[in-house]
Image (cartoon, rainbow, N blue to C red):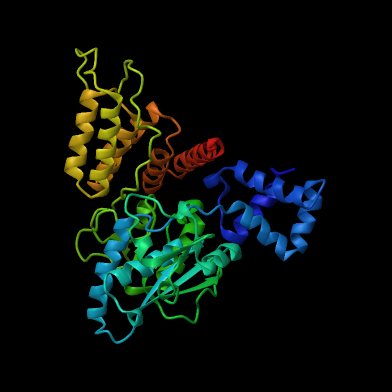
């Protein structure tokens, strides 16, 4: 029942979802769940109900969309935003409030993070306003409620929680001074009338959305985003989307790991398009691999037996690599990678970091080689798959990129299903 292509086409039309980007199984499972909820016996029976019920259409969309977000995800972006916001206020002589858009805003963590970052940076409430928008009414309602569990607070620094939240029995409640800075509404980025009567935004956050669209939809969405962004504004995107914007003439502003792009082309030679560094994948590749010959080892062939080191040393070094890379210390991070490979068996996560560091340096071919080494060691390394897919897409290999995106989606789905 659930692999009926009509459902794929429906989701493509309504929310632009490219089935290859997430894998058929996710959509099939959502259709199966909704069919069972309505006690539909056949695909045709459920399809007829879907066509006649707006509520059921939204329910299917909600079943496919699984929000995965947390406060201050990609923290460097918010540091960069605060710096740019102060400069922008000077440029406009503080004649108006800054306008910031977050879409999709999911359950509110991103727009509230924007507000907290700017308040912490010293901006007064009257100097900025944040607009959050999402296609999911359920997500928007959760955002309006402003109550969050511990899963929304990740990473080593959650001191902001003490400043901007109040803990109650049902979770952490966002402070009213933060809530007042954010306006939330339901909206579809594929709607041609979206925000038609609104002024352009100084800063637009649209993360991890373009990778779920085919090329035609990416172009359509990019045109909308460009129209929403002020001519002097900045667009913040997701880690794997830099090459997609580069193909449309956008240029990185050069702020490491901020995923920030300007719509203005450089008058001279374009700046390299950075593929920024996301947060590390914890633990999965932290333990050293079994000692056996690998074709990608950087240890000389005469050194058959690698230098022995305790597993805890390997895990600590992997953590150090991630910290250095996420702090923008590329040279130190690369040196730490080489240190790891000289003292431990080769690990997929190390080659993954080397790939990202090569991307930042603008060495696309070198980055591809490292990503492929990571995938040799760990074929379902989802982040390596997504970043290699982004590189292939930027080079015109759409078919290869789609295959890798599908593999990444299957990998992430398998990981989620095995979590307790």
- Classify residue 167 as left or right of residue 269: right
Residue at the extreme front of the image, as rendered: 169
Identify which residue is drawn at 72% across, 51% down: 34
Judging depth in this view, the residue of 79 and 14 nearest the camera is: 79
Instruction: Point out the image quarter for the N terminus.
Output: top right
The image quadrant of residue 228 is: bottom left
- Residue 312 lies, with reference to residue 25, above or below; the image says above
Identify which residue is drawn at 26% across, 74% down: 122
The answer to whether any part of residue 236 appears in the image is no
Identify which residue is drawn at 24% across, 13% down: 305
Q: How many marks?
A: 0
Instruction: Point out the image quarter for the C terminus.
Output: top right
On the image, the x and y values in percent for residue 186 come to 56, 70
On the image, the x and y values in percent for residue 218 come to 47, 58
- Classify residue 174 as left or right of residue 54: left
On the image, the x and y values in percent for residue 162 come to 36, 62
- Residue 389 lies, with reference to residue 62, above or below; the image says above
The answer to whether any part of residue 323 appears in the image is yes
The image quadrant of residue 267 is: bottom left
On the image, the x and y values in percent for residue 90 come to 22, 80
- Residue 341 lies, with reference to residue 21, above or below; the image says above
Judging depth in this view, the residue of 327 and 225 nearest the camera is: 327
């Amino acid at each position: 029942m659930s692999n009926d292509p009509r459902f794929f086409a429906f989701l493509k039309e309504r929310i632009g979802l490219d089935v290859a980007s997430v894998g058929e199984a996710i959509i099939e499972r959502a259709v199966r769940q909704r069919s069972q909820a309505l006690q539909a016996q056949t695909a045709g029976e459920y399809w007829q109900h879907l066509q006649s019920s707006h509520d059921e259409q939204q329910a299917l969309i909600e079943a496919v969309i699984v929000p995965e977000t947390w406060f201050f995800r990609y923290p460097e972006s918010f540091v960069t935003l605060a710096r740019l916001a102060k400069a922008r206020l000077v440029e406009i002589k503080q004649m108006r409030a800054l306008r910031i858009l977050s879409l999709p805003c999911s359950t509110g963590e991103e727009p509230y993070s924007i507000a907290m970052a700017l308040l912490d940076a010293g901006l007064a409430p009257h100097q900025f306003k944040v607009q959050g928008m999402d296609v999911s009414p359920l997500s928007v309602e959760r955002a309006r409620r402003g109550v969050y569990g511990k899963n929304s607070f990740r990473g080593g620094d959650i001191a902001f929680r003490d400043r901007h939240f109040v803990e109650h029995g049902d979770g952490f409640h966002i402070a009213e001074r933060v809530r007042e800075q954010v306006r939330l509404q339901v909206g579809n980025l594929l709607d041609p009338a979206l925000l038609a009567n609104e002024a352009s935004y100084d800063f637009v956050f649209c993360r991890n959305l373009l990778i779920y669209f085919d090329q035609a939809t990416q172009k359509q969405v990019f045109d909308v985003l460009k129209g929403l962004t002020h001519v002097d504004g900045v667009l913040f995107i997701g880690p794997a989307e830099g090459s997609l914007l580069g193909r449309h003439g956008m240029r990185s502003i050069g702020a490491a790991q901020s995923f920030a792009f300007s719509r203005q082309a450089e008058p001279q030679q374009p700046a390299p398009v950075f593929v920024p560094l996301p947060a590390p994948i914890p633990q999965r590749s932290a333990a050293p691999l079994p000692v056996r010959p690998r074709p990608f080892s950087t240890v000389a062939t005469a050194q058959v037996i690698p230098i022995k080191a305790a597993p805890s040393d390997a895990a600590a070094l992997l953590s150090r690599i991630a910290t250095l890379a996420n702090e923008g210390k590329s040279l130190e991070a690369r040196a730490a990678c080489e240190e790891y490979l000289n003292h431990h068996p080769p690990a997929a996560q190390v080659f993954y970091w080397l790939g990202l560091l090569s991307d930042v340096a603008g060495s696309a071919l070198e980055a591809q080689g490292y990503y492929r080494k990571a995938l040799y060691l760990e074929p379902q390394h989802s982040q390596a798959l997504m970043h290699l897919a982004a590189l292939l897409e930027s080079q015109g290999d759409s078919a290869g990129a789609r295959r890798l995106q599908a593999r990444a989606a299957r990998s992430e789905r398998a990981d989620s299903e095995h979590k307790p």
